[in-house]
Image: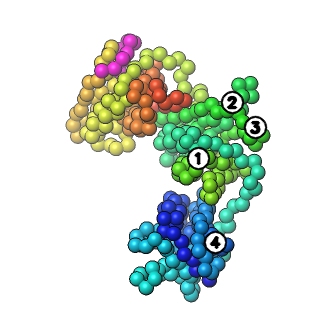
């Protein structure tokens, strides 16, 4: 039966990683657990919610090989709080796991047989493409915030990932797009078309579920490179010793290019942090956290922001901007504007608005490749 000693600094981040993967709402107790396997000087940890599966391994002093599944939450909470550098784990009778620190501390967790744990989906090591982790993290960070939480909008419950080879320019366009029907975010980059990309990937169009994208983003913090491969409606990711399989969304993402206005006049240039701060302050007096209407009045270099919700109070602020178009009055959900400005890094940002009934495009001088779109609200609510 399993008996192993492992460095606490090595196992704690692994157990932390799986907390967001295990399905806490399921009635299947086995997938609330992690599968722990000790053999050949390694301790491997697996977790799954049946849609996303994760596996990694770390060095360990294996006294006796074996495997067991125990509550992911409980073993993490115990190990995290232990006052020791070495975590000692052993399986005892009836699928119980004992965690101990010599004769000073002892904890026992009820487990389940490892044979009942869902098998990790295997994949060949061929056909992967290697991409810069920083690139993938930026693509996800600037799109995941606008993914739909409405289960009825199945195709919008994930991030569209596109890759398009451009042999003439010797580049590859890689883009991620998300929308919840009220707003849209697009992040795209041009990367060098390497021999590996040319050989291992055709033009790609997949929808990664929101939870899967969040896990990929975590992968980006453990290695400089992330390796990706698509096969049979699954996305396989590896980074170092970490492996991730994600079932892709089987659907068709709407034609997002059709809703981005070609005519981009009426450009309002402003300090991003100043407008972000004003919107946050005005939103304090809103009675609805999700739908906080804000009226934006622009005349020359003056922009007035005013809350539409008057139930709890009234708020308005006047800011200096740069604008050369005709005076305009528009309204937007303040949360959508705030969410967008938060994930940008530019000091100077731009609202591009055709007219009062058209969506607002948001860009930034230092956010190359990023574009957000927010649909307007009706001023009749005022």
Mark 4 lies on residue: 41
- Residue 237 image point, x, y percent: 64, 52
Crowding around mark 2 (Cα neighbors within 10 Å: few <14, some 14 to 19, many 20+) is some
Disc number for residue 31: none
Could you say which is closer to the camera, residue 115 or residue 357?
115
Alpha-carbon span between mark 3 and mark 1 = 20 Å
Q: Nearer the viewer, mark 2 or mark 1?
A: 1
- CB atoms at circles 3 and 4 under 8 Å apart? no
Separation of disc 2 and disc 4 at Cα?
A: 43 Å
Name which quarter of the figure residue 196 lies in: top right
Say whether disc 2 or disc 4 marks the residue closer to the N-terminus.
4
Residue 19 visible from this viewpoint = no
Decide which of tag 3 and tag 4 comes sooner along the chain. 4
Q: Residue at x 56, y 48 (%)?
A: 220
Q: Earlier in the sequence, mark 2 or mark 1?
A: 2
Task: Determine which residue is flagged by label 3.
Answer: 195
* Nearest the eye: 268 or 329: 268
Q: Which residue is mark 2?
A: 171
**Residue 9 rendering spot, x and y as whole percentages:** 48, 65
Along the line of sight, which residue is nearer the eye, 231 or 248? 231
Which dot, 2 or 4, sits closer to the camera? 4
Give SS at disc 3: helix
Q: Main secondary structure of the magenta part?
A: loop
For the C terminus, give its image quadrant.
top left
The residue carrying pointer 3 sits among few (fewer than 14), some (14 to 19) or many (20 or more) residues within 10 Å by Cα, namely few
Q: Which residue is mark 1?
A: 224
- Residue 277 in picture, x, y percent from top left: 31, 34
Q: Earlier in the sequence, mark 3 or mark 2?
A: 2
Residue 271 in the image: above or below residue 222: above
């Amino acid at each position: 039966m399993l008996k192993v000693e492992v460095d606490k600094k090595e196992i704690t981040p692994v157990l932390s990683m799986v907390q967001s993967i295990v399905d806490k709402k399921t009635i299947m107790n086995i997938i609330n657990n992690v599968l722990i396997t000790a053999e050949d000087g390694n301790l491997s940890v697996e977790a799954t919610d049946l849609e996303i599966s994760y596996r990694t391994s770390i060095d360990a002093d294996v006294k006796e090989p074996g495997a067991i599944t125990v509550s992911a939450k409980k073993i993490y909470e115990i190990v995290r709080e232990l006052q020791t550098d070495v975590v000692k784990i052993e399986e005892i009778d009836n699928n119980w796991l004992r965690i101990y620190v010599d004769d000073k501390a002892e904890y026992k967790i009820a487990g389940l047989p490892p044979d009942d744990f869902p098998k990790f989906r295997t994949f060949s090591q061929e056909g992967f493409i290697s991409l810069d982790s920083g690139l993938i993290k930026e693509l996800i960070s600037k799109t995941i915030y606008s993914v739909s939480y409405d289960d009825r909008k199945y195709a919008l419950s994930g991030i569209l990932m596109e890759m398009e080879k451009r042999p003439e320019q010797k580049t590859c366009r890689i883009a991620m797009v998300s929308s919840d029907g009220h707003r849209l975010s697009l992040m795209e980059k041009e990367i060098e078309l390497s021999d590996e990309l040319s050989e291992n990937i055709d033009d790609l169009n997949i929808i990664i579920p929101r939870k899967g994208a969040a896990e990929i983003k975590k992968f980006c913090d453990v290695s400089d490179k992330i390796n990706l491969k698509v096969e049979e409606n699954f996305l396989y990711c590896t980074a170092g010793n970490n492996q991730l399989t994600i079932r892709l969304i089987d659907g068709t993402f709407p034609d997002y290019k059709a809703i981005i206005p070609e005519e981009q006049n009426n450009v309002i240039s402003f300090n991003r942090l100043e407008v972000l701060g004003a919107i946050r302050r005005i939103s304090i007096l809103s009675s609805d956290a999700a739908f906080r209407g804000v009226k934006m009045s622009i005349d020359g270099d003056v922009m007035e922001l005013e809350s539409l919700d008057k139930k709890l109070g009234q708020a308005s602020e006047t800011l200096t901007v740069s604008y050369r178009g005709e005076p305009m009055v528009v309204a937007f959900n303040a949360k959508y504007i705030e969410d967008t400005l938060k994930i940008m890094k530019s000091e100077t940002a731009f609202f591009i608005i055709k007219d009062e009934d058209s969506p607002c495009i948001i860009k930034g001088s230092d956010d190359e490749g990023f574009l957000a779109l927010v649909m307007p609200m009706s001023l009749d609510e005022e």
